[in-house]
Amino acid sequence: MDERAVERVAERYRLLLPRAAQTGRVGNLSSAQVGSSLELHDFREYQPGDDLRHLDWNAVGRTGRLILRVRKEEVAPRVEILVDASRSMAITERKRERARELAALFEKMGRAQGLTPVLHWLADSPRRAAKEVPTDFDARRPLGEALSRIALRPCGVRVLISDLLFEAPLGPIFRRLADGAARLAVVQVLDPDDEDPQSGEGARLVDSETDEALDRLLGWDVLQRYRKRLAAHLAAIEAEARRVRAAVCRVTAGEELEACVRERLVGSVVEPRGR
């Protein structure tokens, strides 16, 4: 992981936070800077006795649950970062390290904005990561199962980092991710070979999740079928994201980190500092 590159990018960009009404006008969710008690800071579920005027109707419409906007003095701001640690995410070193860089970057930006970042590592034993971004990508269980084994809390921002290259139904996963999040962003990390594999005389294809192997000639017809299925899968991801009002960004591993952020994440996950 290029820690210096992460530091440079974190100095130039910040997480894109939910938009919420503030005394009659639209403004950003507040940072940790001192301000009035009217500044919004985070979101939580409705509890009996709460003032219904503080309901966030966008979050209610998206999740079907009563979500309140809460004030700075009520709760620490929160951002949840979820990393799919399945074996396919480490199929190449550049793909694995890009996922780790993005996790470190979002965590660092969140802290700089006064948020409370929580990093969920969705490996075979899903856990909250502390201090350093883990290196193990060993999960064989489906992503949906890993998500069901962690406790997600209502939060201002939730980000998933995954290649989303699996056969499981996408709808339940996106609904689980959106549940309780004022803003959901999905960052899809793909290796160049995921997006555009090249033909060859022959190859031994190994399923990174199951270790099943298949000797196969990677001819033009095979690759065309793969590209067609990939295009349909990407379209399905976009459709499910629209249903829960999530932002989806596709990132290619291997390109320079700052260019990746500038060209693929600005406006959906991050924004330049100073805006």
Image: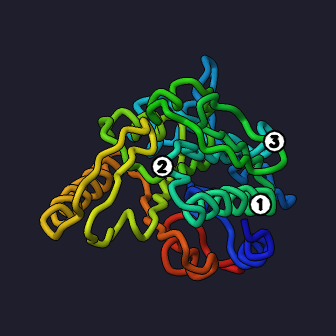
The disc label shown at residue 33, or none: none
Inspect the image, locate mark 3, and give the three-letter code of the amino acid beneath it: Ala
Residue 25 showing in the rendered view: no
The residues tagged by marks 1 and 3 sit, at their Cα atoms, a distance apart of 13 Å
Residue 4 showing in the rendered view: yes
Q: Nearer the viewer, mark 1 or mark 3?
A: 3
Residue found at the very far top of the displayed protein: 48
Q: Is residue 67 above or below residue 185?
A: above
Tell me residue 102's x, y (percent).
Answer: 64, 61
Relative horizontal placement of residue 33, taking residue 160 as reference (left or right): right
**Dot 3 lies on which element?**
loop
Q: Nearer the viewer, residue 142 or 149?
A: 142
Q: Nearer the viewer, residue 54 or 17?
A: 17
Q: Nearer the viewer, residue 221 or 19?
A: 221
Earlier along the polypeptide chain: callout 1 or callout 3?
1
Relative horizontal placement of residue 267, taking residue 274 as reference (left or right): left
Say which residue appears at 77% left-offset and 47% top-offset.
116
Relative horizontal placement of residue 175, taking residue 79 as reference (left or right): left
- Mark 3, Cα crowd under 10 Å, few <14 / some 14-19 / many 20+, is few
Say which residue appears at 77% left-offset and 60% top-offset.
108
The residue that label 2 is drawn on is: 88
Q: In which quadrant of the rendered view does residue 192 lie?
A: bottom left
The residue that label 1 is drawn on is: 108
Q: Nearer the viewer, mark 1 or mark 2?
A: 2
Q: Nearer the viewer, residue 50 or 207?
A: 207
